[in-house]
Image (cartoon, coloured by chain):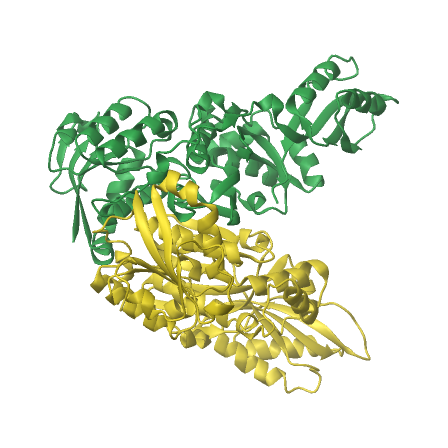
Chain colours: A yellow, B green
Amino acid sequence: MNKITIGLIGYGVVGSGVVKLLNKRKKYIRDKFQTECHIRTLCDRSIDKKDTSILENCKLTNDYREIINDPDINVVLELIGGLQPARQIVEESLKKGKHVVTANKELIANCGKELFQLAKTQGRHLYFESSVGAGMPIIQMLTEGLAGNTFYKLYGIINGTCNFILTEMSKKNLTFAQALEEAQRRGYAESNPTLDISGMDSAHKLAILVYLAFGKFIKVNEIYTEGISHISHDDIEHAESLNLTIKLLAIAKRENDELEAHVHPTLISKDHPLASINGVYNGVYLTANPLGDLLLSGEGAGQMTAASGVLSDLLNLASRGHDANLHSNLYSEAADLKIRKIDQSRTRFYLRFMAIDKPGVLSKLTGVLGKHDIGINSVTQKAHNRAAAVPVVMLTDYTTEKNLRMALNDIQRWPIIKSKPVAIRMETLA
Amino acid sequence: MNKITIGLIGYGVVGSGVVKLLNKRKKYIRDKFQTECHIRTLCDRSIDKKDTSILENCKLTNDYREIINDPDINVVLELIGGLQPARQIVEESLKKGKHVVTANKELIANCGKELFQLAKTQGRHLYFESSVGAGMPIIQMLTEGLAGNTFYKLYGIINGTCNFILTEMSKKNLTFAQALEEAQRRGYAESNPTLDISGMDSAHKLAILVYLAFGKFIKVNEIYTEGISHISHDDIEHAESLNLTIKLLAIAKRENDELEAHVHPTLISKDHPLASINGVYNGVYLTANPLGDLLLSGEGAGQMTAASGVLSDLLNLASRGHDANLHSNLYSEAADLKIRKIDQSRTRFYLRFMAIDKPGVLSKLTGVLGKHDIGINSVTQKAHNRAAAVPVVMLTDYTTEKNLRMALNDIQRWPIIKSKPVAIRMETLA
């Protein structure tokens, strides 16, 4: 029988979920995994205000040092989130010879490289399955399940809040504001939803995935990030009629010695499996060699799904031997990879102009785009109305971001263009 | 640096793929996984006829005992397939203290329980990622990635040949015979395709997945299995018009202390992610607690995808410690689970009758179904033709297989029914 003696730091949503799950699965874990998990000490800043009645034989404290300095504790669960004191807790725990399990995406995205190195030096495990996609085992898949593969492309729907909002807008004809309100009502979005809808949450997770898939540590602010608040229902409808759907995608691509990584709303074919990942579900689509294309999808948020990832980390950690060399692949960096800036990225675009309905508008638009070397694959003008501006929708051929920006800068100053042009990137995933 | 000294038995499609991959990734594996893999001995029945020029410092033999009795070999790759001598090779290797990696679904499906037990007694690893879904890491996901979850439902598209045939029939309007021919032409189907199209290959893989997900060892012949050769293009078209698509699904469901496991063509909603798993791709859709629904999909067949799974097994094995307790969850059986027979299984059905177009036919059909307690959700009669039989398509409510069989037995004896009624099960996966 393996025995894990746990110090749990952070008794919020995920922490209390882990306690519930460990309690519920006690016998199952003992029978099936020959493992006993005992939470010896629980630390929370506001421990006095928490209901801890579910815990048995557990010391309560608001000082995490009681956990770090306890020689009987061999695994520390860091579930407080944020950079500090989480970083200090993880570092000190590893230095004291403890294994660490964390669900902290901000910490791993920003300090992963140093922390993995420290864990290696200390000969201890650092697990972080729930930092991306909650319990959906994308971290283990990248570090172990696909070991020996090299990766070319990664497309992730890795923010459940944004995916829920876009799904509601598209299936229920809601505006962005209405869909956001619905997400908040259901508890899928915070009262201040900025981190999610700005794409920043996805950027943190993408930084982690990029490190695992491509061996390149990339700073979160090196990832070009665009949120979903400017997506209008009109664009979703135009997209539908073109057999496309809009998803907030975290994208990383390797081409020779260049890597690009960005987060932005993206049009993809409705026939692609990622297009069916709806609501709060997450999905990661990978192109690997020799394995080819791979999709993993599951619920990406929620108390118990995050707790599921933490529990699998605990059980896997317990089953590894004392001289295990797990995650050895985390410690080598592909130093030769350069980051390609967004303005050099080549992609196709969906463009929507609100233009005065006059003869010659289309030729003027296509003319300027052509001048900037941007080919057009299709043009649709949905309505005619001599009095008001009408939408002109174009799909471009591959072009650089830079050329597109220059063209749009020209166009938006014309008096016949009545609002800021909309440009949404398109990806062909198959 | 870890060192793995390998004895490779079986130099067919997968075996030679593994050698190619190890060769190509030598430096990558050394740098990233601090592991050196050396094939010390290669054994093949027809070793004289094989091109082994790619191998360096490798003994060649046609006697696998040279591998089993070599104390310097610590990992045996069994890649010959079939039950014997594969079983003997795996058993003897484990007894001699070697770890084993195999891609042999027939072996694991039939002898998994005994072999896992033997591996445990010997303190050695037995890995088998490529036995299901080639390199798509479904085995690791079930044994480790989702550790601590309990499972309720499993739906798998786990035979690439059948999925290719059904996709071709549906997308290119081919008959079954034409689609099979195309599969053979492309090398996706054997010249004798029986094992695939009868569903037997899927049944073997399902037996493995059931053991991992539900802890119940189930014999392949306890799995009700129906192939795809009776699926007609008409049914695919009727399905399309009902927003449904036909997939060969391997299904396992747990309800209280009963488990059902079957393989058969199944109608699912076109909106479900499994419906977009096309061509030779495999996909497994799971319902787990607390994780919820999860989908893993990837290429399920092919030399290099299978080799990818074998390589990840090798690298994971190398990174585990000597006292690792991996796959401890393989050794405990859920003895309390009973197998529910197919005739007690409750499902909805798509029915197609070819009936003489006379007044009263519909009422006669629904009457007999009602007598057998089978409710009807929809009826469509596509054409009217007083001279010939016309298709009458019905979707039933939930009913037992047994009631349906009795009703169809009655109906098919009527003179107005011109061919054997078609019954295809429907599943609501969401």
Relative to A355, residue A101 above or below: above
Q: Residue furthest right?
A: B359
Q: Position of residue A32 (x, y in %)?
A: 38, 39
- Asked whether the viewer can see residue A295, the reply is no
Q: Position of residue B77 (x, y in %)?
A: 24, 35
Q: Nearer the viewer, residue A241 or A293?
A: A293
Relative to A393, residue A330 above or below: above
Residue occupying image coordinates x 25% and y 59%: A124
Q: Nearer the viewer, residue B190 or A14?
A: A14
Q: Position of residue A289 (x, y in %)?
A: 35, 51
Relative to B245, residue A414 above or below: below
For residue B7, what is the image quadrant? top left
- Asked whether the viewer can see residue A85, the reply is yes
Residue occupying image coordinates x 56% and y 33%: B256
For residue B413, what is the image quadrant? top right
Instruction: For the C terminus of chain B, give its image quadrant.
Output: top right
Q: Position of residue B303 (x, y in %)?
A: 34, 39
For residue B264, what is the image quadrant? top right
In the visual, does B356 lie left or right of B166? right
